[in-house]
Amino acid sequence: MHIDTATFESVRTPIYHYDIQLLRKTLAALDAARHGEANIHYHYAVKANARPELLRIISGAGLGADCVSGGEVSAAIAAGFPREEISFAGVGKADWEIDLALRERIGCFNVESLPELEVINERAAALGMTAPVCLRINPDVDAHTHEKITTGRSENKFGIPVEDTVEAVRIAAGMANVRYRGLHFHIGSNVLNMDEFIPLCGRINELQRLLEAEGLPTAEIINVGGGLGVSYEEPDAYPVPDFDGYVDVYRQHLELRPGQQLYFEPGRSVVAQCGTLISRVLYVKPVRRRNFLILDAGFTELIRPAFYNAYHKIENLSSKEAEETYDVVGPICESSDVFQTDVRLPGGHRGDFIALRTAGAYGETMASGYNLRPLPDAILS
Ligand code: LLP
């Protein structure tokens, strides 16, 4: 992390800081993991961080975009992602969003249900167009991650049930205003054990054999979603995720057909480590045997600890005093506005700069204006 606290002296906190050098290094490692194989495509999951400056760097590195709303499709186009490398997923696409994506001629809709497929076919017909689609299949594979970020089990709302795959492909392939392009999967997020992706590969292999046996068209695209995790505990030891190991699992276990394109949708692994939420200590408040370190940042800027019990490493950038134990909390009028309890930190004072690390993914994009707080700004360096 390249942070000089002097950068923040004159700015209002809380504010996000993005380390552009680290982002570029991460993108280079991601590219290297392709081993130059032209059938491997990365579609960055815009939901992780949609700051326009970052999107431009990511599109400039040759990635496509995975979007989940009309707003994200527009942001991706504005940031220079090639339209044919933009996909649009999401369980509830509104008609206006479908029309927008059709008019913009994006590369692929990731369709999550048969009723949605029918609506896309109808909207495309009304516009005199053909909609390119992948079918998002819920593979019923458990990613063994946090229950709120697991997506590929049959009880989750995402995708077409795996047992309906044959019927769905038959319907899609027969529709007049739909061009069937392939299959899409995503089992969950922040997965650190690469072996968790092996059952997904097995499921895809089974499905490909089943579809072939039924005489259905071979998928042009196999999209395996995102999900690669990062080290929240040791951001300095692991600034760049193990993209090589990640892509290799699929190389080894997925049986691609000749000419098949393999899409990945990394979000967190691209942007998490380059982002830090910078905050100032407002007050140090001793209450009985507790010491509250009250920050000017709260869950309005970083909701992950309150929402998922997520751990973000906390550092005092201003103090070199002996360590004390603190409950680090925000200013929001909610008891859940706690970043972490019982943290050992150098003695803190009003005005100290506090860093909340690994906040580049699902930090700024999940910010809210609750309590009429302004949305956070950012500094890139
Ligand atoms: N593709 C699909 C279809 C997804 O649903 C997601 C994330 C991704 C790709 C990107 O996954 P990633 O590489 O970032 O794991 N707000 C939560 C994470 C929600 C993830 C939702 N889907 C968090 O802060 O942990």
Image (cartoon, grey):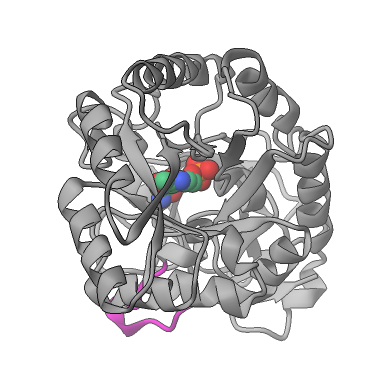
Write the residue at 77% across / 35% down: 34
Q: Would you place residue 249 above or below residue 299 in this image?
A: above
Q: Is residue 350 above or below residue 215?
A: below
Q: How many marks?
A: 0
| Main SS, magenta residues | loop
* Quadrant of residue 186 within the rendered picture: top left
Q: Nearer the viewer, residue 53 or 34?
A: 34
- The reply to whether the magenta stretch includes residue 373 is yes
As drawn, is 201 to the left or to the right of 355?
left
Residue 245 seen in the figure: yes
Q: Nearer the viewer, residue 132 or 281?
A: 132
- Please report the residue visible at 60 percent of the width from the left and 59 percent of the height from the top: 85
Residue range of the region highlighted in magenta in the rendering = 367-376
Horizontal relation, residue 213 to residue 38: left or right: left
Location of residue 147 (image quadrant)? top left
Viewer-nearest residue: 156 or 5: 156
Taking 39 as reference, is 176 left or right?
Answer: left
| Residue for point 81% across, 74% down | 6
Residue 243 coordinates in the image, percent (x, y) = 71, 32
Q: Is residue 361 magenta?
A: no
On screen, 182 above or below 353? above
Residue 14: tell me if it is visible: no
Asked if 51 appears above or below 250 in the picture, the reply is: below
- Residue drawn 56% across the image and 34% down it: 229
Q: Position of residue 206 (x, y in %)?
A: 40, 14
